Amino acid sequence: MQLPERVTVYEVGPRDGFQNLARFVPTDSKIAFINALSAAGLPAIEATSFVSPQWVPQLADAREVMEGIERGQGIRYPVLVPNLTGLERALDTDVREIAVFTAASETFNRRNINATIDESIDRFRPVMARAASMGLRVRGYVSTAFGCPYQGDVDPGAVVRVTGDLFEVGCSEVSIGDTIGVADPAQVHSVVAQLQRHFDLGGIALHLHDTYGRGLANVVAGLEAGVRTFDSAAGGLGGCPYARGATGNLATEDLVAMLDQMNIRTGIDLTALVAATSALAASTGLRMPSRAFEALRAQQRALIPA
Ligand code: HMG
Ligand code: MG
């Protein structure tokens, strides 16, 4: 297997991790979590969403979060933006990178952002123009790329088409989302191979959810297929409010522990990452689904003299 020396881990915990929780995580805990993730060396931390607070009340404090965090040198703090209203709200804070999102399945897109796929791409055009005028970098997401909670199977041709649309409107990177965690390694190989026929894989990321415990297997398939950027959420929190059963993003601890073991560098300090997630668990009482987090925390406890 031809493995890279280095991959980029794109942290989505403060956004994807919190957006689906039954309760509101206090703003101070969110800010402390992001600061601790910065200290652990995460190179890109998706900090929050400027979506409608009626639709996602868990992230209604987006502005306070962006104003409260300390920015580490060289660290990116992108935010999710669904439309021009969201971008203008984001620009009231010191935002330098945004992410727009659409899907490969119509029903999901309608439920998630109240638009068809084509309408969403049209909605992004003025967002992209405004972002370009402000010098912002823009990532795009294609949700439900491996399966849809409403429509079932998704045509890989639709994934290629929507990815092309996102590059065409000006995204510099497109993240291919397994929103409900149903992908398998063979499918990851196949979808990435189809994307590679049309696009440079340097601009493609994989956004995997671990709903059925296949997240890491799918990362290995992605690595083999040539992907070099992986999204994950510290602690393994997460899900999508408009995809029932989409529990658990791939956990950053699980991802980094495996990559460390495989001698693939990420620049992330695993001990500091576990400390960041531990502090969040302590301040909120949230249970973290990450297996590596539990194992490493138990080891760290065992090392502390009684
Ligand atoms: P809509 O109701 O169609 O919006 O929602 P609208 O344009 O008709 O506006 C209705 C009202 O909302 C207006 O206010 C707007 O001003 C306001 P009113 O005049 O009634 O007082 N409004 C806003 N307010 C604040 N911020 C905004 C905003 N936009 C409109 N940005 C909309 C359309 C897109 C806004 C809504 O559907 C929405 O916010 N959806 C977000 C859903 C979401 O966040 N989903 C989770 C993220 S995606 C995900 O998790 C997948 C991913 O992780 C990848 C993967 O796993 O696949 C990325
Ligand atoms: Mg997601």
Image: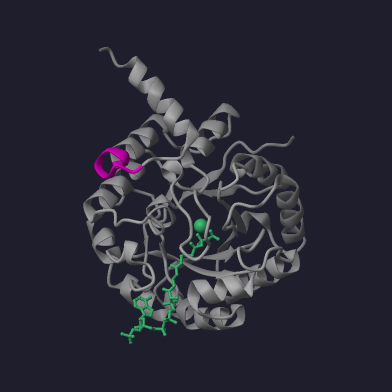
Residue 169 position within the rendered picture, expressed as x and y whole percent measured from the top left: 57, 76
Q: Is residue 72 visible?
A: no
Q: Would residue 143 appear left or right of 50 to someone viewing this image?
A: right
Residue 276 position within the rendered picture, expressed as x and y whole percent measured from the top left: 33, 38
**Which range of residues does the magenta coloring cover?**
280-286
Q: Residue furthest top?
A: 305
Identify the colour scheme used: one colour
Q: For this rendering, which residue is in front, 31 or 250?
A: 250
Work out whether 214 lies above or below 119: above
In reply to whether residue 88 is colored magenta, the answer given is no
Residue at x 74%, y 52% (from the top left corner):
187
Residue at x 56%, y 34% (from the top left corner):
259
The image quadrant that residue 234 belongs to is top left
Q: Is residue 41 visible?
A: yes
Residue 140 position within the rendered picture, expressed as x and y whole percent measured from the top left: 54, 66
Q: Quadrant of the C terminus?
A: top left
